[in-house]
């Protein structure tokens, strides 16, 4: 049975995989996760790449709204479980190494997501027939 810290790493990994699937962080996350789960076996690594591609396809086909949220929850749980199973089967020394690699991938994905985010503060601004255009994550704050 895994200790709480390793379960948290697996949970963060599952969440990061699903969140990265729709961002520029996907290629790095995809390859890193496949490498970790493949454990040096190229056939196993290829199978993991296919699973990861299936995850992205499922997210894209889910669209927006409640259905997409349910799909994200299912996929996060699926990847968390896969990562927990991997960590459980590894010897202690290797388990810690894999957990560290996984933490690194999660941090890399988070930093790339932060770099793609834009924050706009419209305090004390006046808008008449205005538009805010952009792409990616936008956090708009309007203080009145």
Image: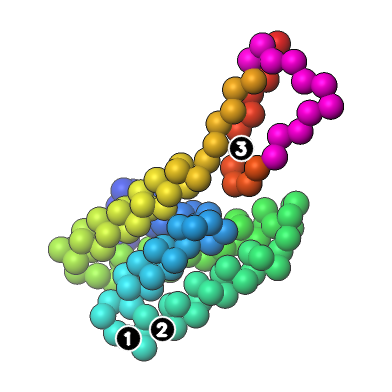
Q: Position of residue 22 (x, y in %)?
A: 57, 59
- In the picture shown, does residue 122 fall above or below 53? above
Residue at position x 59%, y 28% from top? 120
Q: Residues within 10 Å of mark 3 (few under 14, many from 20)?
A: some
Q: Give the image's coloring scheme.
A: rainbow
Closer to the chain start, of discs 3 and 1, is 1
Q: Position of residue 90 (x, y in %)?
A: 24, 70
Closer to the chain start, of discs 2 and 3, is 2
Q: State which region is magenta.
A: 123-133
For disc 2, the marked residue is 46
Mark 3 element type = strand
Give the CA distance from mark 2 to mark 3. Answer: 35 Å
Give the CA distance from mark 3 to mark 1. Answer: 39 Å
Residue 89 appears left or right of 123 = left
Mark 1 element type = helix
Asked if residue 7 shows in the view, the reply is: no
Q: Main secondary structure of the magenta part?
A: loop
For disc 1, the marked residue is 42
Residue 56 appears left or right of 92 = right
Q: Quadrant of residue 118?
A: top right
* Quarter that holds the N terminus: bottom left
Asked if residue 1 shows in the view, the reply is: yes
Is there CB contact under 8 Å for labels 2 and 1?
yes
Q: Which mark is residue 13?
A: none
Residue at position x 41%, y 83% from top? 46
Q: Which mark is residue 138?
A: 3
């Amino acid at each position: 049975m895994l200790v709480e810290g390793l379960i948290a790493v697996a949970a963060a990994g599952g969440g990061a995989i699903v969140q990265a699937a729709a961002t520029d962080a996907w290629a790095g996350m995809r390859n890193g996760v496949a490498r970790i789960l493949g454990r040096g076996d190229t056939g196993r690594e290829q199978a993991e790449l296919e699973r990861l591609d299936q995850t992205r396809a499922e997210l894209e086909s889910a669209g927006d709204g409640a259905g997409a949220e349910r799909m994200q929850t299912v996929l996060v749980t699926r990847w968390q479980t896969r990562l927990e199973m991997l960590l459980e089967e590894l010897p202690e020394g290797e388990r810690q190494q894999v957990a560290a690699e996984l933490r690194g991938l999660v941090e890399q994905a988070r930093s790339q997501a932060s770099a793609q985010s834009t924050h706009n503060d419209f305090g004390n601004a006046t808008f008449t027939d205005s538009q805010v255009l952009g792409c990616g994550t936008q956090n708009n704050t309007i203080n009145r």
